[in-house]
Image (cartoon, rainbow, N blue to C red):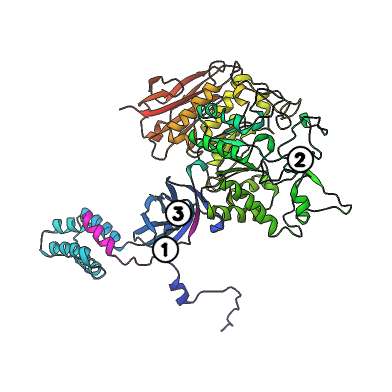
Amino acid sequence: MSSEPLDSAVPHLTIREAVALPRIAIESVQPLIEDGRFAAKAVQGRSRAVTAVIFTDGHEKLACQVLWRDPLAGDWERIPMRSLGNDHWQAEFTPRQLGRGEFTIEAWIDTYATYCDELKKKFAAGVPVSLELQEGEHLLREAMANTSGELLQRLQQVLNRVEGHPSVDERVAIMLDPHTIEAVVQSETHPHKVRSDACPVDVDRVEAEFASWYELFPRSVTDDPERHGTFRDVVGRLDDVAAMGFDVLYFPPIHPIGRTHRKGRNNSLKAEAGDPGSPYAIGSEDGGHEAIHPELGTLDDFLALVEEAKKRKLEIALDFAIQCSPDHPWLREHPGWFTWRPDGTIRHAENPPKKYEDIVNVDFYARDSIPDLWLALRDVVLGWVRHGVKMFRVDNPHTKPLPFWEWMIADIRSQHPDVIFLSEAFTRPAMMARLGKVGYAQSYTYFTWRNTKEELSEFFTQLNQPPWSDCYRPNFFVNTPDINPYFLQNSGRAGFLIRAALATMGAGSWGMYSGFEICEAAPVPGKEEYLDSEKYEIKPRDFRAPGNIIAEITHLNRIRRSNPALQTHLGYQAYTAWNDNIFYFGKRTPDLKNFILVAISLDPHNAQEAHFELPLWELGLPEDAETQGEDLMNGHTWTWYGKTQWMRIEPWHLPFGIWRLTAKN
C-alpha cells in the first residue's frame, strides 16, 4: 500500500538552515521598548540594570555579558552578567555621556566553566577523574593556541605545573584555581556565541529624574495688584525659592499677550481696562514665541535673571505652548500654517466643554506647514536654549502630532543632549506613555487624583514596573494654575502637608505652584479651579502668612537631597499597616544601603493609629531582630524590637512620618 505525499503550505527548515540557527536563546530583554523602536531611559552617572532570560540545551554552562556603548563612543564596554537562577541573568551599566547610547547582550557556551563544574562534582563524589584531568590539559592547550604574549605565558605556567606530575588533589586544585579559570576564559573562542539586537537608550542628566520644581507667574511678583511684576522683581524672590530647596523655577509663557478676545478676571469673556489677560494667548504686535512680554522687561533682564538663578543653583524652565493669540504675527506672515473656514474666519481653540476664545491653533499638516512650521517651532526652542534655558514644560503635547515631537526632540537633543522636556499631558494612559517613548524626559501624572490607599499603592506600583518604568518618568505636581484639587479645598493645612509628603517621597521629581506653601485653596464653587485665578489677573501674595508650610516643605526637600532612595520614583514597595487611612511604604536603593520608610495619614482631620510591619525580611534579618529607626523630620532615634510595631499619626501635629531604617550592629 502506498500513499501520495501530502502537500503542505507550512514552510520548513532545511538541515543547513537549522544548523545555522543560534543554539542559545536570548529572550525577554529589558529594558527594551517595542523591540527597539523607541529608546529606554537612563540617567548619566547612575547604573541601569539589564535583564534577560538566556538558556541553551543540555547541561553546558553559559557565559553572558552586556555590551554598552555611550553616545559617540566607538568601543563597547563589556560587563559580565550574573545568573539570578532559573535562566534569568542581570548586569548593570553606567552611562557617562548624555544622548543616545545602546546596549546588546552576548552569550556563549562556557566550555571551561562546564568542565570545572563536572570536575568539581565528580571529584567531590569520589569518582576517578584521571581522564577528566587529561581533558583539562587539552583545554589548556586549546586556550594557548588562541592567545599570545603575557597571557600565553600564564597558561604555559599552569600547564607546566599540571605536567609536573603532582598528586590528583593538586592537579584538581590547579584546574579549579580562579587564576587558571580567569586565564582560560580570556583565551576561549566562545563557541556558539550569539548576540542580541542592539537596544537604544536615551541618557539624560540627573535633573530629568530628580528635581524639585517651583512654578510662579513673574507678573505676580509684586506687592501691588495694579503694578505688573518684572524679571527684576523675580530676582528678589530667588533666595526664598532656593532656600525652600527647589532646583527648578518654572514660568508660564513670558511672551507678548494678545488683545483680541482677551480674557478678563475669572475667565470672563470681556476684559476690563488693565486686565493682563492669559499668558497662554501668545502673540501681539510686540512679537510671538521668540519675544518677551514688554511689561516683564527686556531680553537683557531675562538673561540677568537666568544668571542670578544659576548663582543660587536654580535652573529656569519655560513653558512651550504651541498656540497663538489672533494677534500673533504668524497669522499675518504665514496664513498657510492655519486652517481657515470658508467665510475667512479661523476656529478658536476648544477642549469641550471648555472654549478658549483668545487663542487659535496651528495646523501641523496644513498647506504650507511642512517643513516651515515644524522648523519654526524647533527654532523657537533653540532660540531659548541659546539664551540659557535647558528645561521646557510643554503645554498639552498630546494635542499635537506625535511625529512632530519625535522629530523635534531628537533634533534638539542631537545638538543639546542636556535639554529636558516635561510633558503636561492629562489624557489617556497609552498617549501619556507614548509621549515618553518619543522623547519626553518626564511627565505630569494622575497623581493629583489618587487619594485613597488603594489608588496610591496601585499607581506607585504601576510606575515601578515595565513598561512604564522604562519609558515614563513622573513629575508629581501637587497643584497647578489649572488644577485646584478637591482634596485641598477643604482639608486645611494638614491636607497640604499630606499631599506634599506624598509627592516628595513618592517621586524623584515633584512640583508645586505658587500659593501652595500658604495653603491657598479658595475654589470656583463645584470646580477644581481657583477662584480669582492668577491666569487672568496679577496676584500678590504674603508668603509669611500664618499657617504657611514653608518650613515643612524645606525639610522635605532637604530629606530628599540627603537620601538617594528618594531621588527617583523607582524603588517603591508597599508594606503592611493595618489601617486603610494610613499609606505605608518603603523607598530603598538597590543595595539596600539607604532604606526609607514612609507612613502618611490620608485623613487630614482625625488621628489615626495602626500596627505595622518592619520589612526585616528584605534586610535578611529574623523576625525578632533589633533595628534602628531615625525620624528624619526631627532627628530622633530609637531601637525597634521585632517585626510588628505601632504608630499614631495626629494631623494637627504632623500627618506623616519619615524614618530611616538600619540594621543594628
Residue 623 lies, in percent from the top left, at 38, 28
Residue 340 visible to an observer of this rendering: yes
| Residue in the foreground of this view, choosing between 34 and 318 | 318
User: What secondary structure is found at the residue carrying circle 3?
Assistant: strand
Q: In the image, is residue 105 above or below residue 351?
A: below
Q: Amino acid at mark 3?
A: Ala
Quarter holding the N terminus is bottom right
Residue 133 lies, in percent from the top left, at 19, 63
Q: Earlier in the sequence, mark 3 or mark 1?
A: 1
Q: In the image, is residue 518 above or below residue 9?
A: above
- Picture quadrant where residue 10 is located: bottom right
Q: In the image, is residue 48 above or below residue 17?
A: above
Q: Which residue is mark 3?
A: 52
564 left or right of 402 in image? left
- Picture quadrant where residue 251 is located: top right
- Cα–Cα span, label 2 and label 3: 55 Å
User: What secondary structure is found at the residue carrying circle 1?
Assistant: loop
Mark in the foreground, 3 or 1? 3
Magenta residues, start to end: 177-201
Q: Amino acid at mark 1?
A: Ile
Q: Which residue is mark 1?
A: 24
User: What secondary structure is found at the residue carrying circle 2?
Assistant: loop
Q: Which residue is mark 2?
A: 258
178 drawn magenta: yes
Which residue occupies the extreme right position in the image?
343
Q: Amino acid at mark 2?
A: Gly
